[in-house]
Image: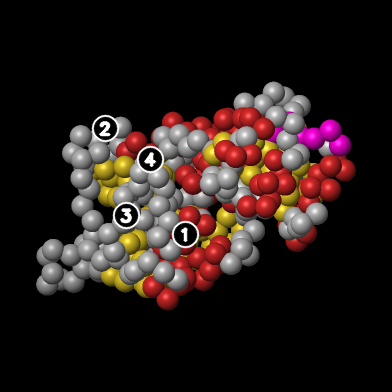
Amino acid sequence: MPKAYVFTQYGGPETEALVEQDRPAPGPGQLLVAVRAAGVNPVDWKQRTGYQRPGQRRRELPAVFGNEAAGVVEEIGEGVTGFAVGDEVFGNPVAGGYAQYALFPVDVTAHKPAGVSFTDAAALPVAAATAYDGVRQLGLPTGATLLVTGAGGGVGVAAVQIARADGLNVIGVASAGKKDLVESLGAAHVPSGPDFAEGVRALAPEGVDAGYDLVGGEVLEAAAELVTDRAKLITAGGKDIVAGLGGSPVVRARTAAVLDEVVRLVVDGRLDPLVTRTFPLEEAAEALRTVEEGHARGKIVIEVEVEAQVASEGDLGSEVAE
């Protein structure tokens, strides 16, 4: 049976398990995808603790981890157009992507260009798409200065690159160990920590034109003091307090059209998903801990082996997977 990495109840890492599950069947508007790679994001472990986006239904347990993945279409649900069996795709799974098979809704699924690997494509639907939505939401003119907090993580590295491709000057706040990474993306690096605002002011004495926060809490509060126009302060990390600071949350489009735009940036060489480490599905726990404990540098991706179904002469119902 196909394997999947799940959490069996809400809580800590002790609730996680690699299990075997029935192969799902696509419903109307869905694709069954043989997963080749799945991106790992902070929201994955947060959902294990019970976190839900506004309007999101509580998931049925056991629940498969993962909110972005890439793979090959195996079956097509009723009413689906524009996709065929064998198409290489990437997007946001219906209910988890750390699995050998996952269901994808067609409205947030895009075709993967041949020149983009499954591993890179799997890193785009959450982190890079969030970065893209935020930068487009700000709508800054060429030459403006953007402050990005959490610039060394998956969303941060994408936001820096997309902003630089738009002709923006970027100041990236990240740990000292990520200095080379941030500077390699074309941003000025400021070490994170309680005094990061002083480092930003040294580079932009009159303040920055906009702020894209990916940390929240005290970091978001300090960043707000650096932005000359609070209407140009957005966050994906401090949605509970940003309104009181005069800013707003990142507004997610969550459409296939955005995925097409993001992957085009990759094809054009303007965006590198920066996958810095991969793990097999059997080591999903270690991949998740790397992100949950804050040690990730760039993107972490789980690579999934093709499920092998070996045929025997006496079993006419079996198949051999390529």
Q: Position of residue 253 (x, y in %)?
A: 45, 34
* Res 162 visible: no
**What is the chief secondary structure element of the magenta stretch?**
loop
If the image is split into quadrants, where does the C terminus sit?
Answer: bottom left
Nearer the N terminus, badge 2 or badge 3?
A: 3
Q: Nearer the observer, disc 2 or disc 4?
A: 4
Circle 1: element type: helix
Queried whether the magenta region covers residue 209, the answer comes back as yes
Q: Position of residue 283 (x, y in %)?
A: 47, 71
The crowding category of the residue bearing disc 1, from other C-alpha atoms within 10 Å (few below 14, some 14 to 19, many at least 20), is some
Checking the image for residue 109, the label placed there is 4
Residue drawn 50% across the image and 65% down it: 288
Checking the image for residue 58, the label placed there is 3
Nearer the N terminus, badge 2 or badge 1?
A: 1
Q: Residue furthest front?
A: 244
Q: Residue furthest top?
A: 141
Q: Is residue 253 left or right of residue 226?
A: left
Q: Reply above or below: 165 against 104.
A: above
Magenta-highlighted residues: 205-210
Q: Is residue 192 left or right of residue 296?
A: right
The residue that mark 2 highlights is 81
Q: Reply above or below: 61 against 157.
A: below
Residue drawn 47% across the image and 59% down it: 46
User: Which amino acid, mark 4?
Assistant: Thr
Quarter occupied by residue 48: bottom left
Mark 2–mark 4 contact, CB under 8 Å? no
Residue drawn 43% across the image and 50% down it: 68
Q: Nearer the viewer, residue 235 or 27?
A: 235
Quarter occupied by residue 133: top right
The crowding category of the residue bearing disc 2, from other C-alpha atoms within 10 Å (few below 14, some 14 to 19, many at least 20), is few
